[in-house]
Image: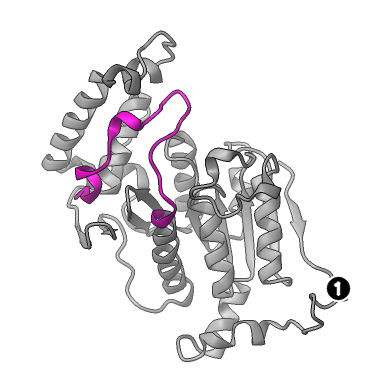
Amino acid sequence: MLAVTARRPQGAPPPPGGMPWTYDAAFARHRGLVSVAEQERLRRSRVAVAGLGGVGGIHLVTLVRLGIGQFHLADPDRFEVANFNRQQGTVLSSLGRRKATVMQRQAHDINPQADLRVFPEPISPANVGRFLEGVDVLVDGIDFFATETRRLLFREARRRGIWAATAGPLGFSAAWLVFDPQGLSFDDYFDLRDEQSPLDQLVAFAVGLAPRATHRTYLDLTAVDLRQGRGPSAGLACQLCAGVIAAEVMKILLKRGSVASAPHYQQFDAYRGVLCHGRLRGGNRHPWQRLKRWWLGRQVRRLGWDRIVAGDRQAPSPVKEVR
């Protein structure tokens, strides 16, 4: 896989208005929150952001504004109209353009000195090692339905001793998990195995990401379109995800403050005004989690999702069936 490295030239003209840009001036308002030495550590840190859509693009912008100076970015997709309600780079002028290219430009408009390496091809076993080479933290922003790619990324990050974080915009909430490379693995926490069906893996991921599921009272499962790989998602939830993940990444990079890694889970629901956190002993193998997985699996099979995931194009659409 070809990685495209981009950095603004040192002799680049000043921005419009003639005002000079310097790193110290751009991030001076962090003083009192982080020390000068800590800010420099952030500047030298490298974060991999996999996926630049709903949460990934906002992750990138939030981390760039934190002053992190080096990134690996991966996303093969292009912006479309359906992205307008939540995705950072979606404007009329970006329609049809590659997400990675658009977000690279946005990041450089914030920090022209940033080192941004773009990986334009899908993450695969052939290139995941190069994507994570020299990285300090992995931030997961890939599509909710891309279970195998997510497993691959977290497995390789663990092998390389890299911390990894994921956050899901569920309803009007953010649910997030952080994985210590010396702690419980991604597959062990979610109880994911190769022999499971794709649908069972999706169910396990959904239930494990938000054990308390604060959003369940107002999220309509029938609005999920498995054929298109789409589900309900709101911009405000993506913003919440970016904020909490940036805080976790900062603590990891600066080795400051406690990081509650898996099996600890957290979810903040802005709509309901609820913050949930706890330690899920055994992860998704916990008896209550097994019961939730069974219940959700039964519900989605009643909607015909198992046939859709298996590739049966004649299976009824969940939305049409309910209507």
Residue at 69% across, 44% down: 98
- Pinpoint residue 315: horizontal percent, then vertical percent: 37, 11
The quadrant holding residue 8 is: bottom right
Residue at 34% across, 33% down: 202
In the rendered image, the quadrant that contains the C terminus is: top left
Q: Is residue 257 left or right of residue 109?
A: left
SS at circle 1: loop
Coloring scheme of the render?
Answer: one colour
- Pinpoint residue 65: horizontal percent, then vertical percent: 57, 72
Range shown magenta: 212-237
The residue singled out by tag 1 in the image is 12
Residue at 33% across, 69% down: 259
- Pinpoint residue 9: horizontal percent, then vertical percent: 84, 70
Q: What type is the residue that disc 1 sits on? A: Ala
The quadrant holding residue 187 is: top left
Q: Is residue 174 left or right of residue 73?
A: left
Query: Compared with residue 169, is residue 64 higher up or lower down, i.e. above or below?
Result: below
**Magenta stretch, main secondary structure class:** loop
- The extreme top residue here reads 314
Counting the numbered discs, the total is 1
Q: Residues within 10 Å of mark 1 (few under 14, many from 20)?
A: few
- Pinpoint residue 275: horizontal percent, then vertical percent: 22, 63
Residue 235 sits inside the magenta stretch? yes
Q: Is residue 290 left or right of residue 71?
A: left
Residue at 46% across, 72% down: 250
Residue 251 sits inside the magenta stretch? no
Q: Is residue 126 left or right of residue 255?
A: right
Query: Compared with residue 147, is residue 209 higher up or lower down, i.e. above or below?
Result: below
The quadrant holding residue 151 is: top left
Between 88 and 30, the one lying in front of the other is 88
In the rendered image, the quadrant that contains the N terminus is: top right
Between 152 and 323, the one lying in front of the other is 323
